[in-house]
């Protein structure tokens, strides 16, 4: 089962800070810049009332943390989940800074969300919650300032409500050209063709490119996926299309296994009317949740929440590649065990960067008043991910280090250069 509650486990903030400090030591990061990057610029917490379907009012707590904007406007998703709190938002915002920097985008890093289980609310309640959250955030978001996007349990519909609320609360002369206040919108409301599959496509490409460096192909490789939301599904879609075999899937409700292969499309269709749950799917049998990570396979894709691979299960992993579709799925101890066991971790800040790369193209499309076609978008995403992959690979070889460390070196160095060139005001 996806672990949201284990007591005493490392927080995602601990994980990201240890990654940052390790890299800062390696690159001998300028001590003044280290002080700036080691802390988040702004931490916004809002409490806002919403009328429920039964007529009562509930007060919700929402977060937006803006870590750094040295490279451009803050960018990052909004998630709706019970695990959202200030520490999680800080960690995830910091990862976004490294992700956008590594991807070579003109963005900084932010993240936020609301501490709720969206499954407990009706669609009209979710709409009012989203709209009041947007209203409460006010000028803390904006198309040239901080640009949210979908994340865990949010989707194009959520983004459409945000854009509509944002547009309705700014002056009428500003309304027509501010669609890029959020990305990941539905295509009919200024969204980008292909943004829906961009993250999963990037996960697929990152695995394929890594295998290529080993002279291997995806054909007949087996993989398992934790989390069958947008990222888990689309990664499985592209991987199975390219000949790989999906043999197990886990979510918060069930763990499914079929050594002959699970049909990624049939599973997705099964989930749709069940609020995303894989439970009850007939094309696989249910197994014990604890056995998931230890299954015999070539590739593990954690595509759910943070801190899923820990000292408790990392030693069980038989796969040689861990492709981090989620943000922060491997904690510090889990990572050490995996590296000692010779595993390759394709780090989240690269592995799932297809999403924010797609977001960048959506932002450009809206900003320039253009309409791009699916094929053109997928080509652009592929080109960017491939270039970035080769940059990280060269760094891995140059530094003789693991993929996360190489990615962090590139990401942090780019921000350091920006500060060195700009200086510090005043
Ligand atoms: N939530 C996604 C992420 O963690 C996408 C962020 C974005 O597109 O701004 O990368």
Image: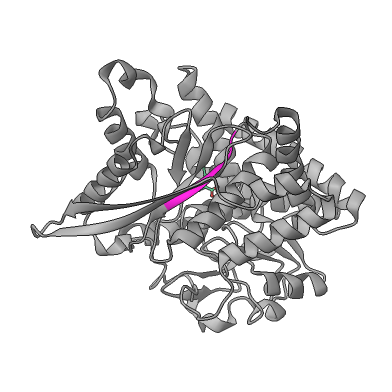
Residue lying at the far front in this picture: please name it: 426
- Identify the residue at horizontal 28%, vertical 33% (top origin): 164
| Colouring convention used in this rendered image of the protein | one colour
Residue 331 x, y percent position in the rendering: 64, 69
251 in relation to 402, above or below:
below
Q: Percent position (x, y) of residue 328?
A: 60, 61
- Count of all numbered marks drawn on residues in the image: 0
For image coordinates 48% across by 18% down, the residue present is 370
Q: Residue furthest left?
A: 55
**Image-based side of 423 in relation to 375, left or right:** right
Q: In the image, is residue 15 above or below residue 235?
A: below
Residue 374 in view (yes/no): no
Camera sees residue 361: yes
Boundaries of the magenta span: 107-112
Q: Residue at x 51, y 61 (%)?
A: 263
Residue 236 picture location, percent across and down: 57, 56
User: Residue 34 vs residue 256: left or right?
Assistant: right
Question: What is the x, y in percent for residue 111?
Answer: 49, 49
Left/right of residue 144 with respect to residue 20 in the rendered view? left
Horizontal arrangement in the rendering, residue 392 relative to residue 76 (left or right): right
Q: Which residue is drawn at the image coordinates 67% and 40% (left, top)?
A: 101
Q: Nearer the viewer, residue 132 or 263?
A: 132
Q: Main secondary structure of the magenta part?
A: strand
Compared with 177, 288 (above or below) is: below
Task: Note whether 158 is above or below 142 in the view shown.
Answer: below
Image quadrant where one finds the C terminus: top right
Q: Is residue 221 magenta?
A: no
Using the image as rendered, state which of residue 265 and residue 120 is in the foreground: 120
**Quarter of image, res 327:** bottom right
């Amino acid at each position: 089962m996806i672990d949201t509650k284990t007591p005493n486990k490392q927080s995602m903030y601990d994980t990201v800070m240890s990654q940052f400090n390790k890299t800062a030591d390696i690159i001998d990061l300028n001590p003044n810049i280290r002080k700036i990057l080691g802390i988040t610029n702004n931490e916004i917490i809002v409490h806002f009332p919403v009328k429920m379907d039964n007529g009562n009012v509930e007060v919700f707590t929402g977060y937006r943390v803006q870590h750094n904007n040295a490279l451009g406007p803050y960018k990052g998703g909004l998630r709706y989940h019970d695990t959202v709190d200030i520490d999680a938002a800080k960690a995830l915002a910091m990862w976004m800074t490294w992700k956008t920097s590594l991807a070579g985008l003109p963005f900084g890093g932010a993240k936020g969300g609301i501490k709720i289980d969206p499954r407990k609310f009706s669609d009209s309640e979710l709409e009012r919650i989203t709209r009041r959250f947007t209203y409460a955030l006010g000028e803390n978001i904006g198309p040239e300032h901080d640009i949210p996007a979908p994340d865990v349990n949010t989707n194009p519909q959520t983004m459409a409500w945000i854009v509509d609320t944002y547009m309705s609360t700014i002056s009428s002369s500003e309304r027509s050209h501010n669609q890029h206040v959020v990305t990941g919108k539905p295509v009919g409301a200024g969204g980008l063709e292909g943004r829906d599959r961009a993250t999963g496509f990037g996960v697929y490409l990152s695995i394929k490119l890594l295998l290529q460096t080993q002279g291997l192909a995806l054909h007949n490789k087996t993989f398992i996926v934790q989390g069958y939301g947008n990222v888990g599904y689309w990664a499985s879609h592209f991987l199975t299309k390219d000949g790989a075999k999906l043999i197990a899937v886990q979510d918060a409700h069930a763990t499914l296994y079929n050594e002959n292969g699970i049909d990624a499309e049939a599973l997705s269709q099964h989930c749709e009317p069940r609020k995303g749950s894989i439970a009850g799917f007939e094309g696989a049998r249910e197994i014990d949740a604890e056995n998931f990570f230890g299954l015999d396979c070539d590739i593990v894709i954690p595509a759910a929440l943070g801190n899923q691979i820990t000292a408790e299960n990392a030693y069980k992993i038989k796969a040689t590649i861990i492709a981090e579709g989620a943000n922060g799925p491997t904690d510090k101890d889990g990572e050490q065990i995996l590296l000692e066991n010779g595993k390759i971790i394709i780090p989240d800040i690269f592995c799932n960067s297809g999403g924010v790369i797609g977001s960048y193209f959506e932002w450009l499309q809206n900003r320039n008043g253009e309409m791009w076609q699916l094929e053109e978008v997928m080509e652009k995403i592929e080109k960017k991910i491939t270039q970035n992959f080769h940059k990280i690979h060269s760094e891995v070889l140059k530094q003789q280090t693991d993929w996360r460390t190489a990615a962090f070196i590139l990401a942090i160095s780019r921000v350091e250069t920006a500060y060195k060139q700009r200086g510090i005001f005043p």
